[in-house]
Amino acid sequence: MGNHFTCMAKKEARDNHGSRSKRMGRSQRKLLAEEELLHRQALSMALQQHQLSQRFDGSMSRRIGSTSSRRRNLSDPFSNGKQVPDFLENIKLKKFVLVHGEGFGAWCWYKTIASLEEAGLVPIAIDLTGSGIDLADTNSVTTLTEYSKPLISYLENLPEDEQVILVGHSGGGACVSYALEHFPKKISKAIFLCATMVSDGQRPFDVFAEELGSAERFMQESQFLIYGNGTDKPPTAFMFEKQQMKGLYFNQSPTKDVALAMVSMRPIPLGPIMEKLSLSPEKYGTGRRFFIQTLDDRALSPDVQEKLVRENPPERVFKIKGSDHCPFFSKPQSLHKMLLEIAQIP
């Protein structure tokens, strides 16, 4: 009899363990399916810009996918409902304005948008002029003012008593600096994500000189130049070949995200990155700047990033190990945590 009950107990334990394993398996499969759906939605949004079969109002990016029904991972520190209100109390400003880098669009922030929304925050991703799903011809964008217009328009329409946290990636850092100069009181914090945090009188292109060579030589010899007004006129934009883009920007990014980028990247207007910025200590100099370094970056090497923060010191510097030039793809969780950490700084 004793042996019978022992065997029954062991069998029940195995059955219970099997049931838990099945439940965990189903849960994990559902999470993966939901992540796959989100990515497909992002890819679909990106493909629309090539078809240009629909017209969009303004240049503000549409949100990619819906995160309201997505389950949080059990390891997510925000998965406990009781933790969210306490955490949000430490963040006075809930609105993050995400500014993409050269060639990218608002689509590149889709993971960051989802994670910030899940944390109870308000992310807003903007397409700069001639980028993402903005319908302007890249070749017609000749100045930083024109390139930054969607961002500037957003800040202009922001109520006087409201502030935002700006996040600029790569070449988008120049747009953040430009915005800091013109709207210092509307920007609580400016976060430069492996970005062109230039000094007064410097061109965004100068930051990439180590990879691309001098501006003068690039304009004369580069094979990536685009002559939108004819070959007898100065070049208007440039775009790397796909293999070069993969090596420079996405050396640690997931394959699916690289595929998304390959059908979404657009030419980079030359005018804005060749323009020298005029930044004053009275406006730009009063802004609170933070820099996030990416330590496996081939587009903007760690040495160049160190030089940027040394020559134009921000309030604090953060580092993401193992990230390529696109941490929103290669290290989304690390980026998410750093954004929240910066947001909580008094």
Image (cartoon, helix red, strand yellow):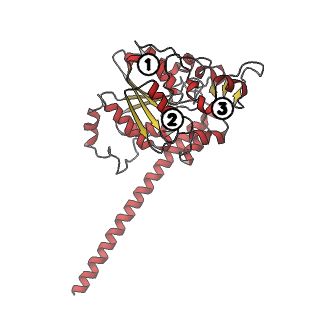
* Image spot of residue 188 (x, y percent): 36, 23
> Separation of disc 1 and disc 3 at Cα?
28 Å
| Front-lying residue, 75 or 282 | 282
Residue at disc 2, secondary structure: helix
For residue 303, the mark is 2
Above-or-below relation of 77 to 224: below
The residue lying at 25 percent from left, 85 percent from top is 4
In screen coordinates, is 23 left or right of 206? left
* Image spot of residue 109 (x, y percent): 49, 36
Upstream in the sequence, badge 3 or badge 2?
3
Q: Amino acid at mark 3?
A: Met
> Separation of disc 1 and disc 2 at Cα?
25 Å
Upstream in the sequence, badge 1 or badge 2?
1
Asked if marks 3 and 2 touch (Cβ < 8 Å), the reply is: no
The residue sitting at the bottom extreme is: 1
Above-or-below relation of 20 to 183: below
* Image spot of residue 153 (x, y percent): 48, 17
Disc 2 crowd, CA 10 A, few/some/many (<14, 14-19, 20+): few
Asked if marks 1 and 3 touch (Cβ < 8 Å), the reply is: no
Q: Is residue 137 visible?
A: no
Residue at disc 3, secondary structure: loop
| Front-lying residue, 19 or 91 | 91
Give the residue number, with chain letter if any, for mark 1. 180
Upstream in the sequence, badge 1 or badge 3?
1
The residue lying at 48 percent from left, 25 percent from top is 197
Q: Quadrant of the N terminus?
A: bottom left
The residue lying at 57 percent from left, 23 percent from top is 129
Give the residue number, with chain letter if any, for mark 3. 239
